[in-house]
Image (spheres, rainbow, N blue to C red):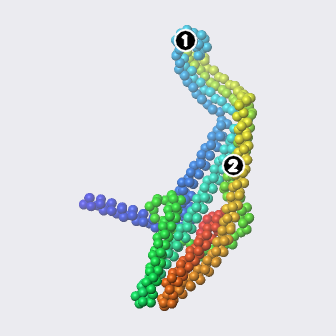
Amino acid sequence: MKRFLIILSILISQIALAQEVGYESSKVWSLEDCLEYAVENNITIKDAALNKNQAAVDYSKAKSSRLPDLNGTASQTFSNGNSIDPITSDFVTDQIYSTNVSLSSSMTLFQGNQINNQIDQNELLLNQSVFLEEETKNNIMVSILENYLQILYAKEGIIIAENNLTASEKEVERAKARLDAGSIALSDYTEAQSQAATNKYAIITAKNTYQQYIITLKQLLELDPTQNIEIQTLGDDIDYLNLELDKMTIYNKALGILPEVNVSKIGVEASEKDLDIAKGGFLPTLSLTSSLGSGYTSVNDNNFSDQFNVNFNQRIGLSLNIPIFNRNQTKASVQTAQINIEKAQINQQTVQKEVYKKVETAYQNATSAQEQLIASEASKLAAEQTYKLAQKKYELGALSTTDLVISQNTYTNAQQNYLQAKYLSVLYHQLLQFYQGNDIKL
């Protein structure tokens, strides 16, 4: 009986687990769900966050360079023969056991403002790392938006292919009946069969494309490859025709919002700090040094504690290091920093050009997609009516199989063109909104 209860409990737990997995796999992901999940789990974003943390550590380290250091030393030595007592500095000929302990500290008082400039530079790099993390998030979010719409496009492509196959199979049945009645030639029947086979192949291709996009989405979300996911389709209330603002207005907003612009700007400022740091190498360095120490020697008759009290010493001093000639190393560092400033300025200009190109491309594509959407919708409706009319004529024997196949293919192409224009219109409208600082949402 006990064994039966154990087996029963195991079966119940397995059923519960299966239900839990089934519930999770049946979750329908909206675009907002994907974006939120990716921000928390995408490893590229996590890597950017770690880079930001490292920049914070470097900034803290730079600030700590203003502080004095503190070192403790202790030594135990033995010498034999002619030597100098390390404690009394007397010349002796004897075996000597000696103990030394000390504390030493030094602090840089002035180093050509290199410490201050290094701290300022690390603060800039920390701010830059924040924008780099934001840029990484933006890139992942845009990739998810593109992939999400590609999945929806492929999913509707499957529906079109399945509908075409259903219609083709019915047309094969009609062609077979007409062949048996002797009203069409065998070639007409085989052409109908060929069209049905072509539509079957189209379904396989469409499903494979859909799965490829699903795999890409899983990788962006860092999901288990075996997990089944479904995404939410677009609502019927979405307006696919959107009038965009003037592209220069969008571009000016993008320059003040997109993180890559700030990254390039801070890059110039950090390079200028590099120049200040390099120039500091021409200036002297002033340091404050101090130490405390004591010791014991075996040649002295006093005991250990008495010697430590007597030998206790304190030192404090200033150290000035003046650079005279270091084989032109500082001069080369200054020249390198000047070159890096120019490179950073060129990179800033390049980033601004890239932002303008992104805005210009998205604006032109959005405008074109909306025009294509209007034209393709009209073309789709006309092709649909033509195809329905062709089907009726085919049923009545007033149309050849070849003409019916041509009509179906024309309708299919019109549907694909409409789908493409629809999702491109959504994509570029969302990109233009995103470049203006608005959230991505459908």
- How far apart, in angstroms, are the residues tagged by discs 2 and 1? 64 Å
Please state which amino acid type lies under the numbered disc 1. Val
Splitting the image into 4 quarters, where does residue 12 fall?
A: bottom left
- Label 2 element class: helix
Please state which amino acid type lies under the numbered disc 2. Gly
- Label 1 element class: loop
Going 65% across and 63% down the picture, which residue do you hit?
Answer: 434
Q: Which of 312 and 90 is in front in this view?
A: 90
**Label 2–label 1 contact, CB within 8 A:** no
Going 72% across and 44% down the picture, which residue do you hit?
Answer: 339
Residue furthest to the left: 1
| Observer able to see residue 28 | no
* x then y, percent, for residue 293: 61, 22
Pointer 1 residue: 299
Instruction: Please report whichever mark, 2 or 1, sits nearer to the chain's N-terminal start.
Output: 2
* Mark number, residue 385: none
Q: In this view, does 152 lie above or below 272?
A: below
Going 33% across and 62% down the picture, which residue do you hit?
Answer: 11
* x then y, percent, for residue 182: 42, 89
The C terminus lies in quadrant: bottom right
The N terminus lies in quadrant: bottom left
Pointer 2 residue: 267
Question: Which of pointers 2 and 1 indicates the residue nearer the eye?
Answer: 2
Residue furthest to the top: 93
User: Total marks drawn?
Assistant: 2
Going 59% across and 74% down the picture, which residue do you hit?
Answer: 417
